[in-house]
Amino acid sequence: MRLVGYRSGRRVIVARRISASTALPIAELEEFWEDPFRWGESAGERESEPIALAAVEQVPPVRPSARVICIGLNYAEHAAEGSWAPPRHPTVFARWTASLALDGDAVPVPRNEPGLDWEAELLAVVGRPLYRARAAETAGAIYGYAPFNDLTARTLQKLTTQWTLGKNTDRSGPIGDIVTSAEVGPIDGGLAIESRVNGEVVQSDSTSNMIFGIGELLEFLSQEMTLNSGDLIATGTPSGVGYVRTPPRFLVPGDVVEVAIERVGAVSSPIVAA
C-alpha cells in the first residue's frame, strides 16, 4: 500500500494511492497514525470512492508533531569523502516537518548559496511506540518506507557546529509516497539506492552498506526518547554528494534531481531560484 495525503478543509486525510492520479481516502491523519497497522493493505476499498489527486491540495501524510530524525555519516564511504572518521555512535540531527515537500514540488536555492547538495536517503516510518527497545525486539516496528532527498544548503550548514540551518531551508526535504513494509518486503539484503541529476547517476549504493542498520538506530534513539507512531527516520546518504567533488558541484535553477530506491519508489524535484 502506498500512502499519500491531502487537505479537506482544515483536515488532512491519509489515502491509499491506486493509480498515478487517484487515491482512496482511509482516515484523518491523527486517527490513522494512532495505530497504522490496523489498516489493511486494501484500506478504503469498501468504504470510499476514489478521489482525483489533481483536484485536491496534496500534502505529506505526516503528523505535524512527528520528529524527522536524520542520521549523518551512516555510510563509511560517505564519511570518508568528507574526511570524517566512521562514527562510533549514530550522528543525529533533526528536521522539522515544515521543511518537507512532495514529488514534483519546486525547491528554491536559498540566497547566498551556490546551490543545493543532493543526499539520497531511505526514510523509515515508525509504526508503534518504542522506548528502550533492543534492536532484536524492533522487528515489525517500522510501518513503511519512503524515498527521501535530504537537500542541503552547505554554506548555512557550515556556519555553526550544528547543522540545523542548512538542513531546514524551505521545501528542502522532498519525500515520496510512504510504502508499507508489507509491500516493500524484507530489506535485510539491502535496497539499491541512487540519485540522479538531469538523468545522470551521481550516487549509487545499497542500504546494506549502512554502518548502523535500522534496528540499531531504533535501539539507539529510543533509549531515553520515546519514538512515536509516525516519526520519520532518515537513515543517511551514501557517497557521491556534490560539495566534495573537484570542483564542487551543486544543484542550480533548471536542474532536476531524483532519488530512486528499489521496491520503494522515487521522488523528483525541480530546482528553482529563491
Image: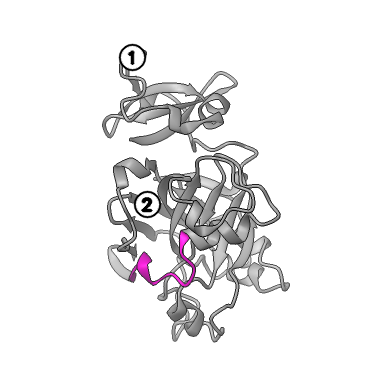
The answer to whether residue 271 is left or right of residue 11 is: left
Position of residue 131 in the picture relative to residue 144 (left or right)? right
Q: Is residue 34 above or below residue 206?
A: above
Give the labeled residue for mark 1.
49
Q: Which residues are magenta?
A: 203-214
Split into 4 quadrants, where in the image is the N terminus? top left
Q: Is residue 194 magenta?
A: no
Residue positioned 26% across, 31% down in the render: 19
Is residue 44 visible in the rendered structure shown here?
yes
Position of 132 relative to 59 (above/below): below
Residue count near mark 2 (Cα–Cα under 10 Å), binned few <14, some 14–19, many ≥20: many
Q: What is the x, y in percent for residue 101?
A: 50, 45
Eye-nearest disc, 2 or 1? 1
Q: Residue at x 47, y 32 (%)?
A: 36
Identify the coloring.
one colour
Residue that appears at 33% across and 14% down: 49
Screen quadrant of the C terminus: bottom right
Q: Position of residue 62 (x, y in %)?
A: 54, 38
Q: Is residue 25 left or right of residue 125?
A: left
User: Percent position (x, y) of residue 209?
Assistant: 38, 72
* Res 111 seen here: no
Looking at the rendered structure, which numbered label has been put on residue 268?
A: 2
Label located before the other in sequence (2 or 1): 1
Amino acid type, residue under disc 2 in the picture? Ser
Q: CA distance from mark 2 to mark 1?
A: 28 Å
Residue 205 belongs to magenta span: yes
Asked if the residue under mark 1 is in contact with the one under mark 2, i.e. CB atoms within 8 Å, the reply is no
Q: Secondary structure at mark 2?
A: strand
Dot 1: within a 10 Å radius of its alpha carbon, few (fewer than 14), some, or many (20 or more) residues?
few
